Amino acid sequence: MVKADLLTRARAGDGEAFRALAESYRRELQVHCYRMLGSFADAEDAVQETMLAAWQGLGGYTEERASLRTRLYKIATSRCLNARRAASRRPVRQWDMSQFEAPLPTPRDEPVWLQPFPDAFLAGSADRPAGPEARYEQTEAISLAFVTALQLLPPRQLAVLILRDVLGFHAGEVAGMLEVTVESVNSALKRARAGLQRRRQSAAGHPPPPAAGSPAEDAIVAKFARAWQSADLDALVALLTGDVFVAMPPEPFGYEGRELVARYFARQFGAGRRFDLVPTRANGQPAFGAYLRLPAGTRHAAGFYVLTLAAGRIRGITRFEPGVLPWFGLPRSLPSR
């Protein structure tokens, strides 16, 4: 009765009533748009557009035809598909590899638009459990490795896989959202599953990461922080798997293998550079804001690192530009110590 009253008031132009109806879905829609787009900033824009479109189209909405949640997901998915298609028409940046010091990075098929997602924004996004047909745990489906693999799928396959295998919507519901046939949904899902499996084969041989916040995770994270802050190269390398990869969005390449990564680390600490790390979490994974210690005593933002763990080792490090720090409540500089 309360919901029906809010809907009646919203249709009559009561913006507060609409917000009371729709705002409870904002966090989960933000996660959905992030999975679709791989970009935290673009996901924010897509959710804003979704809410505006839902508000403007409320006059033609009936609960009998589709739940408000389903309608919001339909609009959000459409906005994300439009954004993906627009992005595909952007000119590809040409990188001058001569600008890089040795060791030269390894080219890799990485989404250059990838951004981290703050764990603080995950709170409340999983209050509604996924449907019974979902194949992935919500924690796995927000990890950087999973989101990276999603970005390399064609847009329609990407949308179908997220709606079906991550959120657990029925095939008929997805067909209605995308305005296609059930047969088309099933065909796209089959191709998407095969494509995702190929992209994720590199992770198949690794043990799973320790549970978030567990003593095992805390131990390896603490070792990494101590080694990085003291520029202890041997200790850092000892934490890595043999096939470790350092990714550096927006650059479509990185450093692969313990030897190349060790040389990359050595270059980071060259000329006596030292860093302080501030811990946080991104994509359900340990993360750090990195601050370069300057001669004047101040510490200036130098990057943002997300660790991908496999049992007691680090199998991936993703470095982002310092511009992402405010999303995690981290400053551009730290005061002198």
Image: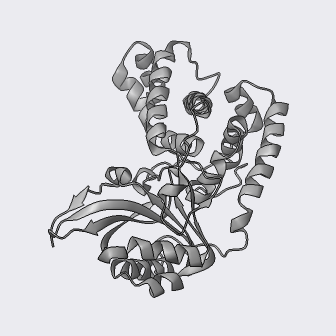
Question: How many callouts does the rendering have?
Answer: 0
x, y percent for residue 315: 58, 72
x, y percent for residue 191: 81, 44
Coloration of the structure image: one colour
In front: 134, or 100? 100
In front: 150, or 47? 150
Which residue is at 56% across, 18% downward? 61
In front: 168, or 84? 84
Q: Is residue 263 above or below residue 143?
A: below
In front: 59, or 211? 211
Which quadrant would the C terminus be assigned to in this image?
Answer: bottom left
x, y percent for residue 44: 44, 38
Q: Is residue 317 visible?
A: yes
Q: Is residue 126 visible?
A: no
Q: Specify the quadrant of the image occupied by residue 186.
A: top right
Q: On the picture, is 165 further left or further right than 95?
A: right
Q: On the picture, is 22 further left or further right than 109?
A: left
Q: Is residue 240 above or below residue 97?
A: below
Which residue is at 58% across, 28% downward? 86
Q: Specify the quadrant of the image occupied by residue 298.
A: bottom left
Q: Is residue 165 above or below residue 156?
A: below
Which residue is at 78% across, 42% downward? 189
Which residue is at 43% across, 41% downward? 41
x, y percent for residue 252: 57, 52
Q: Is residue 190 above or below residue 59?
A: below
